[in-house]
Image (cartoon, rainbow, N blue to C red):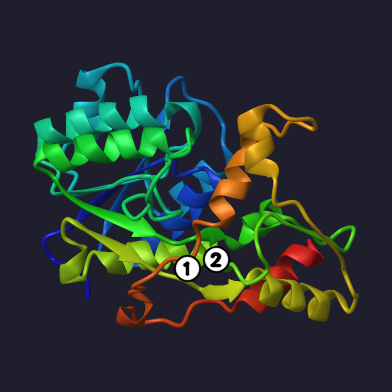
Amino acid sequence: MSDTSYKVITIAGATGLLGFNVANAFLSNDSYKIKILRKKPESENKNANLLASKGAEVIYVDYNDNNDLVKALKGTDVIVSAINGTELVTSQRALLNAAKVVGVKRFIPSEFGTDIKEITGEVHPFLKPKIEFFQELEKSGIEYTIIITGVFYDYLGILGFDHKNKKATFYADGNTKIVATSLPDIGKFTVESLKLPEARNGTIRVAGSALTLNELLKKYEEITSTKWEVSNDFTVRQRYKNNTVPVPTLLEDFVAYLTVNLDIKNLHSDKFSFIPQPITEGISILVKN
């Protein structure tokens, strides 16, 4: 049973890696009408066609035209944003402004990563746009839900796990805990979050896995039947800050930052109706592909 007050779900960024899985999860629930927003001009897209074949209404919009967005969002109860990249703030802000006009009941922003509300000290430049938007969302008067999932299984490689070459690079101590979740499960968590009372103007923290770097390495070695070569690089952040050779890129600096900020506490996973995909299955799929 869904929350009967929510009938129309509009998803922005539904053809991307995350958004496609979120849209699929909603389309698997017959309780909702699903609209997906795509940027004008119209263009052919395999994922959009697949979602449309499952019953989604595809609407092309100009995010710079408030009237266009208002028209597209009319009747929407919940907006789920899976927008990323350079348009994270501008497009979400445009959605929020239009949402206020049409009376959207809840806004789920593009977070789905580390717990930005619990980070103490320095905020990485990659996370500042998300924090800026969340502050605007809090002041908007629209209900919101922040969904925290840790790293996607598909992105475990960026944390230093190179399954092709059977090598691992640790950017933090091997006992550092990493929370991770599969993309299909993130979609399911998003759908079911609409039923949870604590999700109203709250943060929902979920996980498919919560293992240390050493434990993840062991899983990779078991699945590949190979002893991996392991190296440590604990100076990435310092080298980036001091411009010391070899100077890391901003992305490499973010990965090192992210690694020590993925030990997400106070999980709500046990409040959901399904058992998440085990990390072993997620790694097996990555290795096979």
Residue 44 placement (x, y as % from top left): 56, 31
Q: Residue at x 55, y 65 (%)?
A: 182
Marks 1/2: CA distance?
5 Å
Q: Amino acid at mark 2?
A: Ser
Residue 219's quadrant in the figure? bottom right
Q: Which residue is mark 1?
A: 185
Q: Is residue 77 visible?
A: yes
Count all numbered tags in the image, as a single digit: 2
Residue 40's quadrant in the figure? top left
Q: Residue at x 55, y 51 (%)?
A: 258
Residue 261 placement (x, y as % from top left): 49, 56
Q: Is residue 116 left or right of residue 263?
A: left
Q: Amino acid at mark 1?
A: Asp
Q: Is residue 111 left or right of residue 212?
A: left
Residue 58 placement (x, y as % from top left): 39, 39
Q: Which residue is mark 2?
A: 182
Crowd rating for badge 2 (residues with CA inside 10 Å; few <14, some 14–19, many 20+) = many
Residue 126 placement (x, y as % from top left): 49, 36
For the residue labelled by badge 1, is the local secondary structure a helix, a strand or a loop?
Answer: helix
Residue 118's quadrant in the figure? bottom left
Q: Residue at x 35, y 20 (%)?
A: 62
Position of the C terminus, as image quadrant, is bottom right
Q: Is residue 60 visible?
A: no
**In the displayed image of the protein, which residue is found farthest to the top?**
65
Residue 113's tag is none
Position of the N terminus, as image quadrant, is bottom left
For the residue labelled by badge 2, is the local secondary structure a helix, a strand or a loop?
Answer: loop
Label pair 1/2, CB-CB below 8 angstroms: yes
